Amino acid sequence: MFSARLIHAERAGAAASEYRQSVHLFPSDEFDLCFSAEEQHFVHRFFPTISRLNAVGFKGGAEVSGHFDAAIVHVPRSKPLARHLVHWACQLAPDGMVYVDGAKNEGIASLLKAVKAITPLTGMISAAHGKLFWFRATNLFSSWDASSFFEIEGGFKTKAGVFSAARVDPGSALLSHALPPLCGHVADLGAGWGYLSRTALTSSALKSIDLIEADHAAAEAAVLNCDDPKARIHWEDVITWRAPHLYDHVIMNPPFHLGRKGEPDLGKSFIQKAAAILKKQGMLWMVANRHLPYEETLSQLFVDFREIAGNKRFKVFQAVGASVNAPRSQFGC
Ligand SMILES: C[S@@+](CC[C@H](N)C(=O)[O-])C[C@H]1O[C@@H](n2cnc3c(N)ncnc32)[C@H](O)[C@@H]1O
């Protein structure tokens, strides 16, 4: 935990309190914004985290500009993204100090080794199942810049740190193959970089598709991958997004992780949202890891559902007849 490691660092004489303006890159929550600086900013690309931090008064968003005297990297799961953040931190505080914090199970040890091979450290603390280290900003990390989109198999554009950045997810591929040509108005919940929507867009009977995605970089990639007048990309939180109308179909491979933490309830909230935005005869098409317990939620919220495809790892469901019990008002439909 960053706050615990920071206390150790301050006791060891890392004079964090002398900073005027600091910027946090990818803090998990408000407890990560515990640096002693006159002003703390943050940058993130996950819509729900930004909304939560803004709601409790912190300044930040998906973009950041300014000249900071300290930058703190909260190491994300993706290694290319973690390296990119180190490079970006050096750009944001070019004359200042860069702090890098992460848990053991987030690859902090290998990042520490890679940083040390490039520039000398000013300090390092091992505590609370992780490490915090700091060094003077340098432009020696420019080869770690991962801000550009890159192309993967199938011609799709993706970016470091987005879901399934290097290849099409096998679960999503299974759902894509099971989908019939969709007609009418479609919503893709947690659309990522747009793989499922690209499949849906091949149907000439489709009138429109709304892609809702919380990761700013993934939403930007979806704009490139679904360059079609029928597609609208929304950088939003599915749970709080207000649907403009009801849909004929919802397609989704719902998230079940927040960072490293398994969150099957998040998938259940996506199913609730789907039920709330579907027309009475509308259909939900979803894929999930086989071990995830979604059947009860599906049976509560839909008149009927069945497994239409699957293998040892994944199950694909079709659900029809969103029941009147779906909490429509909560979702603004
Ligand atoms: C399992 S991935 C599926 C991505 C894409 N549909 C595919 O099939 O490749 C789930 C996606 O949901 C997004 N996500 C997670 N929580 C979200 C939320 N509250 N609102 C919108 N999108 C969210 C993630 O960023 C991720 O891109």
Image (tube, rainbow, N blue to C red):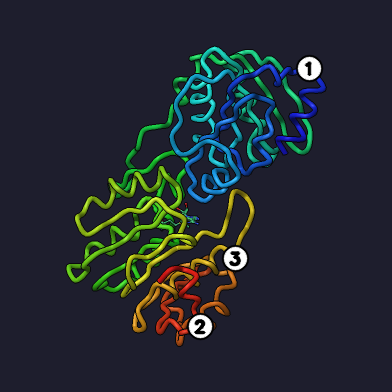
Q: Is residue 3 positioned above or below 261 on the image?
A: above
Total marks placed = 3
Residue corresponding to mark 2: 325
Query: Left or right of 230: which side holds 211?
Result: right
Q: Residue at x 47, y 73 (%)?
A: 329
Do tag 2 and tag 1 residues touch (Cβ < 8 Å)?
no
Q: Residue at x 49, y 34 (%)?
A: 80
Do tag 3 and tag 2 residues touch (Cβ < 8 Å)?
no
Q: Residues within 10 Å of mark 1 (few under 14, many from 20)?
A: few
Q: Residue at x 63, y 24 (%)?
A: 38
> Which of the two residues, 194 or 316, is positioned nearer the viewer here?
194
Q: Secondary structure at mark 3?
A: helix
Find the distance from the CA under tag 3 to the CA under tag 2. Answer: 18 Å
Task: Name the quarter where the C terminus is drawn.
Answer: bottom left
Query: Sequence-wise, which precedes: disc 1 or disc 3?
Result: 1
Q: Is residue 13 positioned above or below 213 on the image?
A: above
Q: Is residue 44 positioned above or below 281 on the image?
A: above
Residue corresponding to mark 3: 265
Q: Which mark is residue 13?
A: 1
Residue 213 position in % (x across, y down): 41, 54
Residue 158 position in % (x across, y down): 37, 43
Mark 3: amino acid: Asp
Task: Name the quarter where the N terminus is drawn.
Answer: top right
Find the distance from the CA under tag 1 to the CA under tag 3. Answer: 42 Å
> Which of the two residues, 134 or 14, is positioned nearer the viewer here?
14
Q: Residue at x 39, y 50 (%)?
A: 235
Mark 2: amino acid: Asn
Q: Secondary structure at mark 2?
A: loop
Residue placed furthest toward the right: 11
